[in-house]
Amino acid sequence: MSVLTRDEAQTRADLLTVLHYTVALDLTTGEDTFDSRTTIRFTARADADTFVELKPAELRAATLDGQPLDPQTLDDNRLPLTLTAGDHELTVDAAMRYSRTGEGMHRFTDPTDGETYVYTQLFLDDVQRVYAAFDQPDLKATFDVTVKAPDRWTVLANSRTTHDGHGTWTAATTPPISTYLMAVAAGPWHSVRTQHRGLPFAIHCRASLAPHLDDDAEEILDVTTRCFDRYHAKFDEPYPFDSYDQAFVPEFNAGAMENPGLVTFRDEFVYRSAVTDTERQTRAMVIAHEMAHMWFGDLVTLRWWDDIWLNESFAEYMGYQTLIEATRFTETWTEFAVARKSWGYDADQRPSTHPVAPEHVPDTAAALLNFDGISYAKGASALRQLVTWLGEKDFLAGINTHFARHRFANATLADFLDSLAAHTDRDVHAWADAWLRTTGVDTLTATTGTGPGRWTLALQHEGGRPHRITVGVYDRVLGSDRSLVLRERHETDVPGEPESHTGVRPALVVPNDQDQTYAKIRLDEHSLETTLRGLSQVPDGLTRAVLWNTLRDMVRDGDLDPFGYLATASAHLPEESDLAIVQGVLTFARGQIADRYLAPGRRAEALTLLGELCRDLMRRTEDGSQPGLRLTAVRHRISSAQRADTLLGWLAEDTVPGGPELDPELRWRILARLAVLGAVDGTAIAGELERDPSATGQEGAARCRAALPDADAKKRAWDAMFRGDELSNYLFTATAQGFWQPEQAGLTAEYVTRWFTDAPAVARRRGPAIAEAAGQWAFPAHAVEEDTLRRGRACLDSDDVTPALRRKLADQLDDLARALRVRDAG
């Protein structure tokens, strides 16, 4: 499929004004294809040649101003058009293919009840898989959409839909929106409907998930309406669409998608099994994030993909901040620090890093690669620093000016900065150059000293960005060598002069105490010792998150022995009160330290230590007062198990002694670990699948079958991923997650070499979504060896690697090289 270049988009935008789309979809034509008939009304400013995009199974007919066009002129995904100046009408009639990879019109049949669902995911250039379009964000138009659907189906769209009683659904005309934001979701949905502020609100899911959605409907709608009200308090511009539907859809590649009036979420957010309150907070944040997009991205849309941060960074920042202001989830910045910010730090230290706002994104293929921890987490961190530096009042005033100036239109970084500049004397353009046009992570290193009645603090600044930070100063509680109390917090600018303070040197000095900037932190020697001894006694959760991130960075940089991190976790997690921190620390310890940063001979020792830590956490939660902490401990004890007997006992009794009882998620988690250990076989997996035949059960079975320590099982899994095209995006990922296991390195050694030929082939054949899955989940990340690195670099040097896979492979190789350095340092 030809990608659209920035120059082509600019040329077409200069030529065309697109007025209106009429899109008619027929979903009753079979299981493989659907019919799509599109009429586009537009104006050309001059005589010129251009093109419209579509990728059909069959192009039946096309007419321009009533004159037929030759379908044979369709070249890949472009139908050429010769225009004269003036008004035009283009009609395209085509059959389009359903997708099994979450791109375009995805079709899913629920194994639980046999019901079928379809939904669109048209970002970034997948519009052309569903309807013909001038597919670029700055050619906005109004839409009229009709859908013919099977009986008993409900059709959802960007605006309110009505049914004519004969299978055809009609959506109300939309305001001007970008082509990638048009959305349809159809099937026998289970729906919970309400009204808020005079608008219809609803949430939808598959029929088989109905009881679980009903259980959480009150919470989901409460978060939705609270965020809606809070955004109306912040923004002068009211919600710009006629309804608000949230559809939880199957096999969704992203967390969610901000289609105006019809937000689609991955339906794992409809919880079938027990979850922690932190996971509920994550769902609430995604709800808040996507609602923010109704303004940031939908009302005002980027002109080209180099400004994707104007969508994602703002929605990320607003989602976390609004959740704090409007809901019971008041500690969301701690979860951001532990889970999201590390995503940004990691991405920003790889060769593939890019500015938050790159100056030139040449085409849509390059743009797709920028949806990463930089555009989301680093961008949100930059905005948090901007608010700290600018003040929230001026920041919100600038945002509201931006909305007013570019309502239902498109905007650039320069436009946004001009809107901010109208409300402040600060040089926001210089700030943007320093923060948004640069790459990499600054490092702030603290040095403390003492003198008569005084102590001093100097902050060495490695990097080029200005920072306004809060420094936290902590003392030990009298009579305790571990307990800490806050002495003071004070703001300071970096770079700046060393500071002198009266009194004795504190036990702990924490630069960036409230995590208001984006930088790696290095503590002074005295503070590091205090942290290792008393981290759990630091009174504020966000401060503890900053310190855990510091230790994590030190491990990754070879400045702290991985076992030193594990020892700190063992000492302090049993006393940690913030569940997001516990989850983040255990995830890093299990997934990175045990599996990658330690040599294979030391892995068993690390797993033993983690197992003991989880048993300690379980002992401390036997009274039932901390169910989230207990569930987290149980999950990680399962993943760290090196013997099968305890897990087999839990599975047989269908409960963990003292709770919880085993729900489907825990049963599949246990079965997957037992498969790795060779303690179950295909018969046991089939029996569990009979017990849980759901889509999640199908994924669990695929994961378990791929994890079996059996040569035939490995071959079947590999062939399913790389030789055939039948696996959906989710089943591909599940199979990949099961395939590679450090315990089975000898069994899978031959496949390490095969990945570098088979993965590029499947990426070329199946497209970006499978390419990303092959690069993220199917890569042999456990093979931390120089030979893996050498083969990977040779693969990158070839011309056979698609852009999506190339980015994932480059990142994997950089992580692998880092793991080798950490091992050498240890």
Image: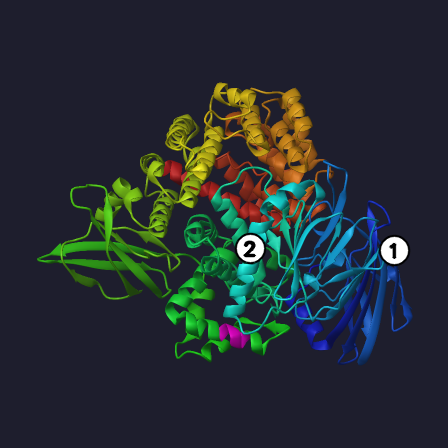
**Residue occupying the point 49% across, 33% down:** 635
In the rendered structure, does residue 400 fall within the stretch colored magenta? Answer: yes
**Between 537 and 382, which is closer to the camera in this rendering?**
537
Queried whether the magenta region covers residue 471, the answer comes back as no
Q: Are marks 1 and 2 in contact (CB under 8 Å)?
A: no
Magenta segment, principal secondary structure? helix
The reply to whether residue 105 is visible in this rendering is: no
Judged from this view, the residue extending furthest toward the right is: 67
Task: Establish if 266 lies above or below 387.
Answer: above
Q: Quadrant of residue 554?
A: top left
- The residue located at (16%, 53%) in the rendering is 505
Judged from this view, the residue extending furthest toward the left is 452
Residue neighbourhood size for the residue with mark 1, other residues' Cα within 10 Å, grouped as few (<14), some (14–19), many (≥20): few
Figure quadrant of the N terminus: bottom right
Residue picked out by circle 2: 222
Residue at numbered disc 1: 166
- Magenta part of the chain: 398-402
Q: Is residue 129 left or right of residue 625?
A: right
Instruction: Tell me: residue 266, above or below residue 374.
Output: above
Q: Residues within 10 Å of mark 2 (few under 14, many from 20)?
A: some
Nearer-the-camera pick, 216 or 20: 216
Q: How is the image coloured?
A: rainbow
**Amino acid bearing label 1:** His
